[in-house]
Amino acid sequence: MSARESTVPEPAVANSRRDARADRVFRGALLAAGIFVLATLGGAAASLLWGGREAFQTFGVGFLYHTDWDPVKKVFGAFVPIYGTLVSSAIAMIIAIPVSFGIAVFLTEIAPSWMRGPVATAIELLGLRREEVALLADVSTTVYSRLEKGQDTASSRDAIKRIAEALHLS
């Protein structure tokens, strides 16, 4: 090896080793998180199967694909609710996915910068549940629900002001 061809300086080697060790730790943590998610999903599926074992013992696997639901004759089939759930979920995704991509493209590529903040906040607020708004405003869910429905409440001006601030109305 000539004088011009020198090895990598010592600090760079130490940094490289530290980075490799950090990568291994990260890879292990990521693997553990993935296994945890899969185990949790498996546990949820096992819990559902265990909870539904009586239906399967009584009606067999046909419970999943029969359409009859007659409590008088004690004949039950879950196909109609299962089908309805799958169809309504598919319709919701057919509507929501293009709309969400459209909003994302609009906010990142088309909207002027002064419009991005208010529009993004309004979209986020559409997703807030009643409980989350009440929590943000530090009022009870009951008080917020009554105000939302226009029912008379004995809410203080301070509570109404906190709700308005939580909704970015003031």
Image (cartoon, grey):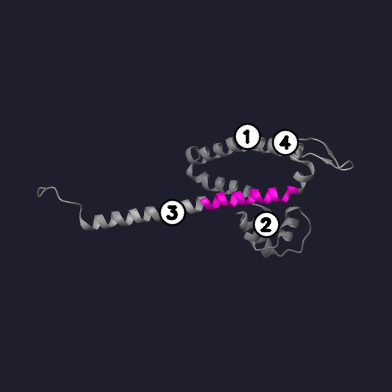
- The kind of residue on which mark 4 rests is Tyr
In the drawing, what numbered circle is on residue 83?
Answer: 4
User: CA gap, disc 4 to disc 2?
Assistant: 30 Å
SS class of the residue under badge 1? helix
- The kind of residue on which mark 1 rests is Ile
Comparing 3 with 163, the one in front is 3
Q: Quadrant of residue 99?
A: top right
User: CA gap, disc 3 to disc 1?
Assistant: 37 Å
Contact between labelled residues 2 and 3, with CB atoms less than 8 Å apart: no
Contact between labelled residues 3 and 4, with CB atoms less than 8 Å apart: no
Q: Is residue 36 magenta?
A: yes
SS class of the residue under badge 3? helix
Comparing 11 with 143, the one in front is 11
Q: Main secondary structure of the magenta part?
A: helix
Contact between labelled residues 2 and 4, with CB atoms less than 8 Å apart: no
Comparing 143 with 10, the one in front is 10
Determine which residue is flagged by label 2: 131
Chain-order first, disc 3 or disc 2: 3
Contact between labelled residues 1 and 3, with CB atoms less than 8 Å apart: no
Q: Which residues are magenta?
A: 35-53
- The kind of residue on which mark 3 rests is Gly
Q: Is residue 169 magenta?
A: no
SS class of the residue under badge 2? helix
Which of the two discs, 4 and 3, sits closer to the camera?
A: 3
In the drawing, what numbered circle is on residue 28?
Answer: 3
In the drawing, what numbered circle is on residue 151?
Answer: none
